Image (cartoon, grey):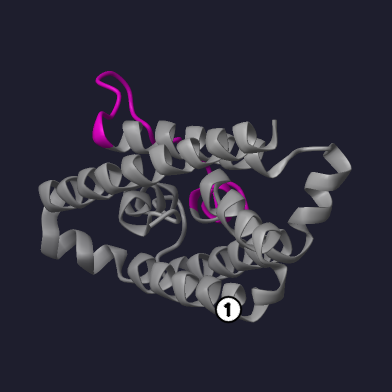
Amino acid sequence: MVMDPFGNIPFFLSAMKQVDPARQTRVVIRELFFALIALVLFLFLGQYFLAALNISEPALTASGGIILLLIAIKMIFPPQYGSRQEEFEGEPFIVPLAIPYVAGPSALSTVLLFMSREPLRWPEWLAALLIAWLATSAIILVASSLRKRLGKRGLLAMERLMGMVLVTIAVQMLMNGVHQFWAQV
């Protein structure tokens, strides 16, 4: 859910408007692999990144919760004026499809937290990451047909539902971070 494939469908479709239809699938697959690389790097190297910046696990948990909460609130209550979607010219490369749409702040902080809490379970974390990435990839790759089947309102309903679930996860992450901080003090 933190990768939010249903919420990202409108962004992917918008970003791919300028890309030749014959290349769209290849571009999406390439971007999904870039996102996977970023996520795997954060899974294995994220704890060293935190240590170098002297960021504690409670701070990461709380900030991940705040970021996820902001994303979820935008999913539930999109801006009234203007569009959340950015306009792109030409073919996207890494930004914005791979990062931040798939490998966004909430997904990166989630994998980083998993590994920093229980590094010996890395095979499980890697497997979970691969399963989540595969599910996200499958949904994004069928985005065009999904949009036709669900329609604009159906996609909007899916995004709002995912947003409500993410709000709960975000609040729990924030509470966990605060609890961890107070336990250390």
Q: Choose between 136 and 50: the one closer to the eye.
A: 50
Instruction: Tell me the residue at 61%/75% (across/down).
Output: 126
Instruction: Tell me the residue at 47%/77% (across/down).
Output: 131
Q: Is residue 24 visible?
A: yes
Q: Is residue 7 magenta?
A: no
Q: Main secondary structure of the magenta part?
A: loop
Q: Percent from the top left, x then y, of residue 122?
A: 67, 75
Disc 1 residue type? Glu
Q: Is residue 93 visible?
A: no
Give left or right: position of 52 versus 157. right
Q: Percent from the top left, x then y, of residue 98?
A: 57, 56
Residue matched to label 1: 124
Could you say whether the residue bearing mark 1 is in a helix, strand or loop?
Answer: helix
Instruction: Tell me the residue at 30%/71% (across/down).
Output: 142
Find residue 54 and report its image quarter.
top right
Q: Percent from the top left, x then y, of residue 115?
A: 67, 63
Q: Which residues are magenta?
A: 76-101
Give left or right: position of 116 versus 25. right
Mark 1 closeness class: few <14, some 14–19, many ≥20 residues within 10 Å: few
Find residue 55 and report its image quarter.
top right
